[in-house]
Amino acid sequence: MSGDKPKHSILISSGRTTEAVHGGGEEGEEVGGGGGGGGRRVAVPVGIRQPLRIGGGRGCAAARAEQPLLCPYGLYAEQISGSSFTSPRKLNLRSWLYRIKPSVTHEPFHPRIPGNKRLVSEFDQSTSSATPTQLRWKPVDVPDSPTDFVDGLFTVCGAGSSFLRHGFAIHMYAANKSMDGCAFATPMVIFLYPELLITTECGKLQVSPGEIVIIPQGFRFSIALPDGPSRGYVAEIFGTHFQLPDLGPIGANGLASARDFLVPRACFEQTTHPGYTIVQKFGGELFTAVQDFSPFNVVAWHGNYVPYKYDLSKFCPFNTVLFDHGDPSINTVLTAPTDKPGVALLDFVIFPPRWIVAENTFRPPYYHRNCMSEFMAKADGFLPGGASLHSCMTPHGPDTKTYEATVAPGEVTEPFRIRETLAFMFESSLIPRVCRWALESPYLDHDYYLESPYLDHDYYQCWIGLRSHFSCNRGETMMDNGNADEDS
């Protein structure tokens, strides 16, 4: 490699969204242009609970019927459904795409050669391992050879089965070239540090640092790297869809607002493209089909099933204002619920810049064991591009250095602001299994688990230094009795 510093991103994969993308402008609104995509403003605001109609030119979308005998401008009408036809109306997701050629116009699919053996969608003993140990990974290296998003994608952990439509997978990727002459089809959510240009069937999404992208199941997309090499994170869920969490006692406002989600303008490619390849991820395996045109030929679309992005700086966080530490669930951006109320298949949680004001309170996250499993990445504690995994009931919390520095000054009453940070977490009610290359590869932090240079094999050492401060004499301070006899 030329030594270019890689950027980092997070791609979150989803089957669909509900409230987060319901709505738009006035019915019949026509936005966007032709193949140019309307310059740099490639996304438009999303309202709530009204279907969107985004066109590439006035009158492109059918005005009355969804599929008239002859569509305007000789276009084909094609529906993409993100839910069953008979799902309740508030959960029913579909969009109508008006395109130059229908997506069915391709040769048969065949297994991709070469495949990507590091992609997993069925998590069992043959593909992954279970471990209750705390895990931490160093950032992966950017490949030396040209590698696009598809070939640079690999699974770290997950649970369940894509065939049974229940579960999730967490991937990471390292890429150094844009996708050229091909499109990928798999659901995902991407958390982004660098800038990416993602072309979807509904239009282009220019994604800046600190934004996430959600690409629903079935949509084809291509990722360009305008700023050079990139590393990032991908979450994929099976059988359900991301939505905004309920606010409960918070009330009507706060956390992520539906108005801040953006969807792409319609933007289409009209020229022929012999040999264009569609890469379909199906049950964890990759298949390819060839066609003679770009799949990004949608002139207009309308509906509520669509790729979208969100700027995390617009998230309105909540925190305690007197004492104690709030639970991390208060920072949920999107949730993929299960049938059990209050239990998520996968939550996407962030820890943005914020004020800390609790009095006489241990302000870092408390020590805990959780029935949920947490995959986390953050700007401090380890390098961007790295990650940690604390599975169900695995204890974790502040390291020795953080604890001692926090309690040393005694009572803390002054507020302070956490600046220039953005940590995130994928949290699931399922117990993840870890792919073997994530345990044995050079990306495992060597100080943490096995003999891999990327697995942090010494991770556990950050807690070993925690010592007993217990004393039976309540008149003595904790720090004065740090070396007290534990049997006294």
Image: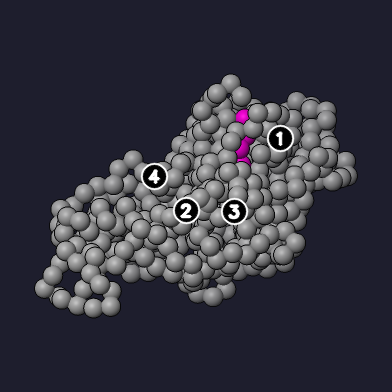
Residue reaching furthest to the left: 475
Can you tell which quarter of the image residue 467 is in? bottom left
Q: Is residue 223 left or right of residue 227?
A: right
- Residue 147 image position (x, y, % from top left): 68, 32
Calculate the distance from the C-alpha at mark 4 to the C-alpha at mark 3: 23 Å
Going from N to C along the chain, the mark reached first, 2 or 1, is 1
**To which quarter of the image does residue 268 belong?**
top right
Q: Report if residue 284 is visible in the image.
A: yes
Q: Main secondary structure of the magenta part?
A: strand
Q: State yes or no: residue 12 in magenta.
A: no
Q: Amino acid at mark 3?
A: Leu
Mark 3 secondary-structure assignment: loop
**Distance between the alpha carbons at the discs numbered 4 and 1:** 43 Å
Q: Are the residues flagged by discs 2 and 1 in contact, CB closer than 8 Å?
A: no
Tag 3 residue: 450
Residue 169 visible? The answer is no
Q: Secondary structure at mark 1?
A: loop
Position of the C terminus, as image quadrant, is bottom left
**For residue 297, which numbered disc appears in the image?**
1
Q: Is residue 30 left or right of residue 183?
A: left
Q: Which residue is mark 2?
A: 459
Whichever of labels 4 and 1 marks the residue nearer the N terminus, that label is 1
| N-term-proximal mark, 3 vs 1 | 1
> Which part of the image, by quadrant, shows the N terminus?
top right
The relative height of residue 374 versus residue 225 in the rendered view (above or below) is below
Span colored in magenta: 172-176
Q: Residues within 10 Å of mark 3 (few under 14, many from 20)?
A: some
